[in-house]
Amino acid sequence: MEAKNESLLEIHDLSVAFRMYDQVLGQKDLQVISDLHLTVRPGEVVAVAGSSGSGKSLLASAILGILPGNATVKGHLHYQGQELTPARQAALRGTEIALVPQSVAYLDPLMKIGAQADGHRRPKPTEKRRELFRRLSLPEKTGKLYPFQLSGGMARRVLVSTALISGARLIIADEPTPGMSLDQALEALKLFRQMADQGKGVVLITHDIDLAFAFADRVAVFYAGTTVETAPAADFRAGPEALRHPYSRALWRALPQNGFQPIDGFQPYAGALPGGCLFAPRCPYKTAQCEQSPPPVREIRGGEVRCYHGA
Amino acid sequence: MALEAKNLWFRYDRSQPWILENRNLTLERGERVALFAPSGYGKSTLSLLLAGYLQPSRGQVLLEGAPLPRRGVCPVQLIYQHPEKAINPRWRLKKVLEESGKLDEQVLDAFGIESAWLDRFPRELSGGELQRFCLARALMSGADYLICDEISTMLDVITQAQIWNVVLEQAEKRNMAILAVTHNQNLARRICSRVVDLSRE
């Protein structure tokens, strides 16, 4: 139990499935997240990188308890050592746990930006909001505009400020930086870094992995609904030799500055997952064992990897 | 043979500030140009004007010397920053694609669009998957100019490299021009032959 007390957020064996209609009469469960582990300690920025459609945004919704009604969640979610029940999620979200949503469509189109960022808080956090807007180089007048008058990058920065204004201890930032220029993205990440340095926790879901490598403490790599590797960010800065999973190395090599070489094939679709290792169909090192049963999580060189051959 | 923005000015309303002021840009057929600027500089607005979705307050957009066609398929196709907002949420994806003509198996294969996805609704696919549909839809219409407004920002880097490699290959084959709006300098260096920086003009 001690480990749970130390961590801010602890996720164990999490699985999420959607109940869908199949043919005329039947229903089936489509498993979109399986056996997922993730820990966030106070003071940490944990980056979640990985394939589009690997369940990163669903993880964010699962933590906040805002999955749609046809979703079933199994496994253990703990926040500050206590189980995160639906009632507790409802009580904590927006105050203790805040979300930076992925889509700019989360902004209310009929409400001015200033009022949205302030929310229902009394007294109004106007001064704090102005300070955040300044840090994120949003012009003073932004508060008086409607969402349609903002560019994509400005809307993102507004979303970041709405989460930071809450004073939450755990921030789940789902792709906060697209559309921002490099300077603005760095400033937003600096704000997250500072929050973490004050003892809070940040889950940073992102495709800007080169930025994440620079700002995060640890990086969790997602593939087809599970974590294939969790490693110190320093290993990702060091290069592919320091990484443990072939998919992590493939991500590194696909960066425009590192070769722009994609691996072939596609992430398997939920509902048609392979029986063994989820990455086996695209893996150059696969053996018979990989196709038979999914590899367990192993600890190697201070990181966790789900691979029989990882070294 | 070029797409030109000539002395473009744009604002939404007389009471609103100018978003673009006297902007000029030429995109030659077959050329690949990266468009840089901090957010809020009017990159997306310029994209909308070039593709004919907005009319300039002053100035002109010329396609090979003439205004953009008002009817039929526009040879300038815009791919958006947010694919989920560029697709009818109540159409199955097959119908989304068929809007630009008969399904072209080669294009679908190139983008890795699986046949099972065609029967799904947009909300059942991830942003990265939807972006492949937007690109396939534009390519199937026979576009000569592709305006790519941060098209790979929502994709993982492997999918980004896959998709751009397909787009570049198709652009080469069809002598298509590309204007790529991006904040990623490393990506711009990889995919483009020329960079235009709006903040330095």
Image (cartoon, coloured by chain):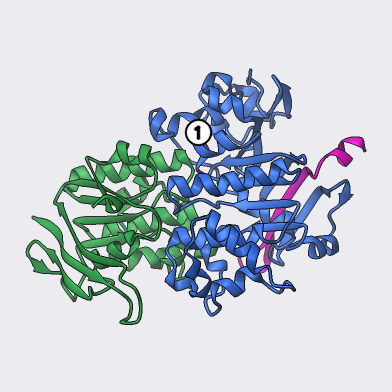
In the picture, measured across the screen, residue B188 lies left or right of residue A294, that is left
Position of the N terminus of chain A by quadrant: top right
Kindly identify the residue that appears in the image at 20 percent across and 67 percent down: B8
Q: Colour of chain B?
A: green
Q: Amino acid at mark 1?
A: Leu
Residue assigned mark 1 = A251
Residue count near mark 1 (Cα–Cα under 10 Å), binned few <14, some 14–19, many ≥20:
many
Q: Say which chain tag 1 marks.
A: A
Relative depth, front residue between B106 and A174: A174
User: Does residue B84 appear in the picture of this structure?
Assistant: yes
Q: Residue at x 25, y 55 (%)?
A: B146
Q: Most extreme residue toward the right, as rendered?
A: A1
Q: Which residues are magenta?
A: A1-28
Q: Position of residue B98 (x, y in %)?
A: 34, 66
Residue A187: image location, x then y, percent:
53, 47
Image position, residue A77 (x, y; %): 81, 49
